[in-house]
Image (spheres, helix red, strand yellow):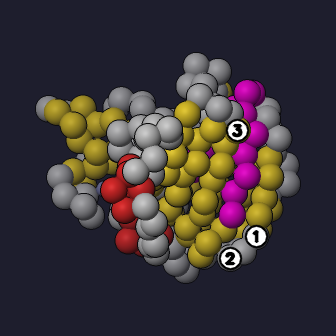
Amino acid sequence: MDQRIGHQIGDLAEVLTNLGVFRMHPEDVIALCPSGFRRVPINQGSDHYLSLQGFAPGQIAYAHTHPDSEEWIVVLRGGGRALLAENPVPLAPGVIIGRAAAHPHGFVSDDGGPLHMISLQVPRPSERTTTWDQPGETTDPADCAVGGTCRRCSRCGGHSANVRARIFVCENCGFEL
Ligand SMILES: [Zn+2]
Ligand SMILES: [Zn+2]
């Protein structure tokens, strides 16, 4: 066991502490839900945020801007569009897209099937400086595909599970609604 690398609780990287090597299909760890897109952190620190991102068919991540963070995405499966300012970029399996800091961006998946991507953000975007550029809409609370109830985050479009009473917390941006 390598003690030099710390793993944040909840990151997929925790499995490496015990397993050493880990092989997976994205669909095994991203439980897609119709209410909002999902993000599974793989490994993160102040200087990076590596994650899996999964969209059910026809799902959106509302446009936003990180002034302090670049991003690279690799499309693993499915299709859709990266909404980069005026110029949408088509997403297809195997495509790699880099985005400079301060470029407004969002994503939308095709209606035909799920979209899976790997995202590397360098450094980890700060919550404080992120601006939410596109007015989003929430959904009524509904039974979640993975249990409990959930709704869509009106700020980022992310999956937001019910945590207590009538409070839902977005697993992507931390917004409470
Ligand atoms: Zn759900
Ligand atoms: Zn959110």
Where residue 64 sits, quadrant-wise, is top right
Residue 127 highlighted magenta (yes or no): no
Check whether the beta carbons of the residues at disc 3 and disc 2 lie within 8 A of each other.
no
- Pick whichever, 113 or 120, lies toward us: 120
Up the image or down, 144 lies above or below 173; here it is below
Residue under the point 40% across and 51% down: 1
Q: CA distance from mark 3 to mark 1?
A: 19 Å
User: Which label was assigned to residue 93?
Assistant: 2
Q: Amino acid at mark 2?
A: Pro
SS category of the residue bearing label 1 = loop
Q: Amino acid at mark 1?
A: Val
Please report the bounds of the magenta region as a residue range.
61-74
Q: How would you classify the magenta stretch by its main secondary structure?
A: strand
Of labels 3 and 2, earlier in sequence is: 2
Residue 105, horizontal then vertical, whole percent? 72, 45
Q: Amino acid at mark 3?
A: Val
Q: Nearer the viewer, mark 3 or mark 2?
A: 3
Check whether the beta carbons of the residues at disc 2 and disc 1 lie within 8 A of each other.
yes
